[in-house]
Amino acid sequence: MQALPVPIVPFATRRPRRVLPGFGLALGYTILYLSLVVLIPLATIFLKTAELGWDRFVQVVSTPRVVAALELSFGAAAAAALVNSVAGLLVAWVLARCEFPLRRLVDALVDLPFALPTAVAGIALTALYAPNGPLGRILEPLGVKVAYAPLGIVVALMFIGLPFVVRTVQPVLEELDREVEQAAATLGASSMQIFARIVLPAVWPALLTGFTLAFARAIGEYGSVIFIAGNMPMRSEIAPLLIVTKLEQYEYAAATGIAVVMLLISFFLLLGINALQAWSQRRLSGVRA
Amino acid sequence: MNSASVTRRGSRGAAGRTVLVVLALGYLGLFLLLPFGVVFAQALSRGLATYLQALTDPVALAAIRLTLTVAAVAVPLNLVFGVVAAWTVTKHDFPCKSALVALIDLPLAVSPVISGLIYVLLFGMQGWFGGWLAAHDVRVIFAVPGIVLATVFVTFPFVARELIPVMQAQGRDEEETALSLGASGWRAFLRVTLPNIRWGLLYGVLLCNARAMGEFGAVSVVSGHIRGVTNTMPLHVEILYNEYNATAAFAVASLLALLAIVTLAARAALESRAPELKRAAHATDDSR
């Protein structure tokens, strides 16, 4: 292409910008289907809330039970995402840098939480951690109550969120230039120094992305949590479950109100974390430059 | 640094590596593999006869049939959308393209429960179209159409988001060549684009199908849990479990777990056949 003779160039610029046909139809269909399936249904939730009026909305979403559910959902999601950031970094590092038997199988296994239906994960975790389950039997005498307690929620969210961290960090680790680490090693840096000064700064933005994705997914998670949580109001009742409960009691205003608060908080959290990520990426490239 | 200290450092590094590998595998074994294994252990805990009985129960069979039906409607709808959306986004230039791509991913950011709730608000008895639907004796919520709608919503982005990076990487040259050689647009699509994206398409369909058959939260909100009528497999698992019929619950769950294995195995096979899929998947799969 670079060797094109000069006279062709004006002809090429005169060429209509869209060569491939079907643009109007394809764009129209895309926007129509997107609007019908996603945008219009999602908009109803905000319009329904607007019908409530501000005072009623605040009243509905500030009851102690709703506040407790929202705190639990966001708190458990943050705790699980933190654990997943550490564990996910470890797993990603091992998969990217170490050779061991069945590595490819283990690599595929990491995606299991993506493929396994959440309800199946939920009952399986409950069976494991219930007081008479194989793990619960060991943990219960030690005073660690997992199933039917807030800790169980975190364990379920750890299961759901792990692949998000591994799959965002692993490709960055695979592409990281190993010569820099080897150079640091020959200059006498310890493994800890290499990790803290070279590896961690390079994977930091990816790790933050992984954290965000795991966190966002965990906030709304329902199927894997409700079996293990115990679902006691004020103690182990997550916000999505409270939406379902309110719906079953025909309290549409409360259900919609909680949903709007969840959507708004997660939207602003994601926005904030994205800004933080952009900042750290800028800082990182600034250091490199 | 003399050579002795280099080897010492090297062997210490190797030991450290082994420790990390063991730690990582231990974590995966405990938190990923063990819950997975428990499904089958529990399902078969009362013998094969009980297992097969739970699966051939008429209500279980009705749930399996409904799950297959819902996937058979939802997956093709999102397949067609995915191809058209990816064609629009990757083969043409237009303003606000990245906004459109972001909107396609929107359902992934919404809690499954909220995905069900929005259809209740639209089509439920107190919903906007509820009165009209009731007057015309059309049931959407607590009926199969609602389940299909909720499933279409949650699986909406799956095919599009796998295809977009694949088609982006392939560019437009081949289609433009086909057109300049006199092929019609439709022919260029069928003979050039479609063969190029077949693996990516299969990959997206695979993931879309797994989610469609396994979806719980969104479907649970709109289904009404009518036994044998609006119960999908995941909902049937829940009902059995809550009735303290754990063995039967795990038996049905084991079918869904098998589906997960098949999905992962097919995914791995596709990735080894078309390595660009893995890269494309890494770029978009889990980032919105």
Image (cartoon, grey):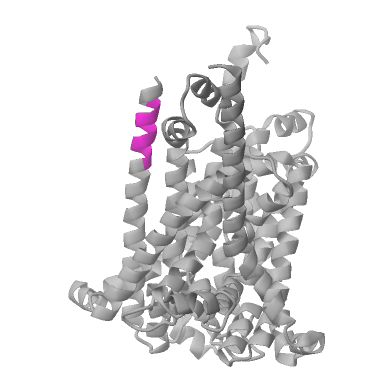
Q: Magenta span covers which residues?
A: A277-285
Q: Residue sitting at 61 percent across and 74 percent down?
A: A120
> Where, by quadrant of the figure, is residue B144 drawn?
bottom right
Q: Residue sitting at 51 percent across and 46 percent down?
A: A89
Instruction: Indicate whether B61 appears above or below A285.
Output: below
Residue B164 visible? The answer is no
Q: Which of A146 and A174 is in front in this view?
A: A146
Residue extending furthest left? Answer: A55
Residue extending furthest front? Answer: B4
Instruction: Indicate whether B189 appears above or below A239.
Output: above
Q: Is the magenta stretch mostly helix, strand or loop?
A: helix
Image location (x, y in percent) of residue A75 = 34, 64
Indicate left or right for A229 with B144 as reference. Answer: left
Q: Which of A160 and A258 is in front in this view?
A: A160
Indicate left or right for B181 with A44 as reference. Answer: right
Image location (x, y in percent) of residue A201 = 42, 34
Residue B41 visible? The answer is yes
- Residue A279 on the magenta span: yes
Instruction: Indicate whether B21 appears above or below A6.
Output: below
Image location (x, y in percent) of residue A287 = 36, 24
Indicate left or right for B136 with A211 as reference. Answer: right
Image location (x, y in percent) of residue A115 = 64, 62
- Residue A282 on the magenta span: yes
Q: Residue sitting at 65 percent across and 89 percent down?
A: B229
Count of numbered marks = 0
